[in-house]
Amino acid sequence: MTHWRPASGPQAAASRADMLRRIRAYFDQAAMLEVDTPALSPSAVSDTQIESLEIQRSAVSSRPLYLHTSPEFCMKRLLAAGYPDIFSICRVFRDGESGRQHQPEFTLIEWYRLNFTLQAIIDDTVALIRAALATAAPSALQLHDYRTLFVEALGIDPLAAPIATLADAANADETLRAAIGSERDDWLDLLLATRIAPAFSTETLTVVRHYPATQAALARLCPADPLVADRFEVFLGPVELANGYVELTDADEQRQRIEADNVNRRRRQRRERPVDSALLAALEHGLPACAGVAMGLERLQMLHDNTGDIRDVITFAFEADA
C-alpha cells in the first residue's frame, strides 16, 4: 500500500510557522535583508564531511549539477557585490543523511553580519536561538574553548595527542581503528560526539569555539593562534544547533583549502568536487570582513516541541523506497 499521509499534523505546522515568525522578527529588528539564492549549481562543496546530491543528466547542462547543501557560496557573492547584512531561510539537500535527526532535505537558516567579531556572532546566535525557542530556551550559557574542553573532559590535547591516544580515549576496537586509521579529525569528531557532547546539560546552551585549524572549513584562522580557527558550534544538550565562522576572505587560501579537500576526497575514494570559480572570483574582488552562521530549523523545532524524531516536525519524510 502506498503511504500518502503526512508525517506530522497541523499542530507541528503551526509550531513551525510561529517559530519562523519569531526568527524573521529577530532579523527584521536588526534591519537585515532576506535573500534567495539558487538551489542548483554546477559546483559543490568540497568538505569531506558533507556530500552533495548530484544530478547526472540534464537537458540544461552537459556537466553534472548539484543541489546546494547551503546557500553560503552565493550569499558570499552577494556580500562581495555590496549587499548589507543578509539572511536566508531555504531548503537544502545533503546525500546520505537520514534517520531520527536527519533528512536529506531540510530547512537551513543562514545569515551573515558585516564586521562581526567571533564573540559578537556567538552572542548574535545565542540571542536568535533564544528568540526562536521562546519559553523553551534555557537561560544558562556555557562557553568552552575546544582544546580546553578536551583537556578537561578526557585529559588529552586534541591538537597534539598521538592517534593511538585518541583511539584509546574512544575505547575503539580493532575494527574501528582500522576503519578510521590515521584520520585525526575523524577521531576528534567521534570523541566530541560520543565522549564529550553527551555530558552537555540539556538545561544549558553550550558554545564550543576555536576548533582546530584542520577543521576550519571556510573560517579564518584565529589571528592570535593559527593552530585554531575562528569557528564555533552551539549545542543544547548533545544536539548541535548552529555552526558559525568569522569568514575566510583570502581567495588564495580558500583555493588551497578546496584543493586540499579534493586530495582528501581522493584518499578516501570519494568523488572530487568541481571548484566554485564564482566564489573564488568574488573573494578576489573582495569579500568584506564578515561572520556567518548556519542553523537547521527542524533541529530547533524538535527541541521546542520536545521530540527526538525529525519526522514529528516535517510534513513529509523522505522514503527511499516510496
Image: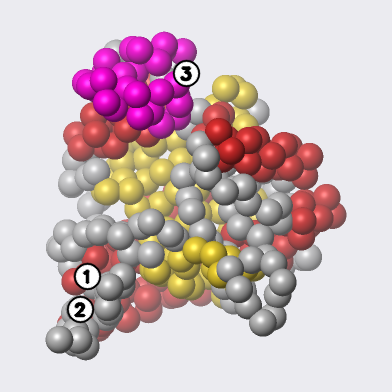
Please indicate whether residue 296 sits to the left or right of residue 283 in the image: left
Secondary structure of the residue carrying tag 1 is helix
Q: CB under 8 Å between callouts 2 and 1? A: yes
Q: Position of residue 111 (x, y in %)?
A: 54, 61
For the N terminus, give its image quadrant.
Answer: bottom left
Q: Earlier in the sequence, mark 1 or mark 3?
A: 3
Q: Residue at x 50, y 36 (%)?
A: 268
Secondary structure of the residue carrying tag 3 is loop
Q: Which residue is mark 1?
A: 311
Please tell me whether the stretch drawn in magenta is mainly helix, strand or loop: helix
Q: Position of residue 253 (x, y in %)?
A: 73, 37
Q: Residue at x 47, y 67 (%)?
A: 92
Please say whether residue 107 is visible from this viewpoint: yes
Q: Earlier in the sequence, mark 3 or mark 2?
A: 2
Q: Which label is found at residue 7?
A: 2
Identify residue type, mark 2.
Ala
Q: For label 1, count other residues whose C-alpha is less than 10 Å away and answer few (under 14), some (14-19) or many (20+).
A: many
Please say whether residue 157 is visible from this viewpoint: no
Identify residue type, mark 3.
Leu
Identify residue type, mark 1.
Arg
Q: Which residue is mark 3?
A: 159
Q: Nearer the viewer, mark 1 or mark 3?
A: 1
Q: CB under 8 Å between callouts 3 and 2? A: no
Q: Position of residue 120 (x, y in %)?
A: 52, 46
> Which region shows up in magenta?
160-188
State how far apart marks 2 and 1 are (Cα).
6 Å
Q: Nearer the viewer, mark 3 or mark 2?
A: 2
Residue 281 placement: quadrant: bottom right
Looking at the picture, tell me which residue is in the foreground, 25 or 290.
290
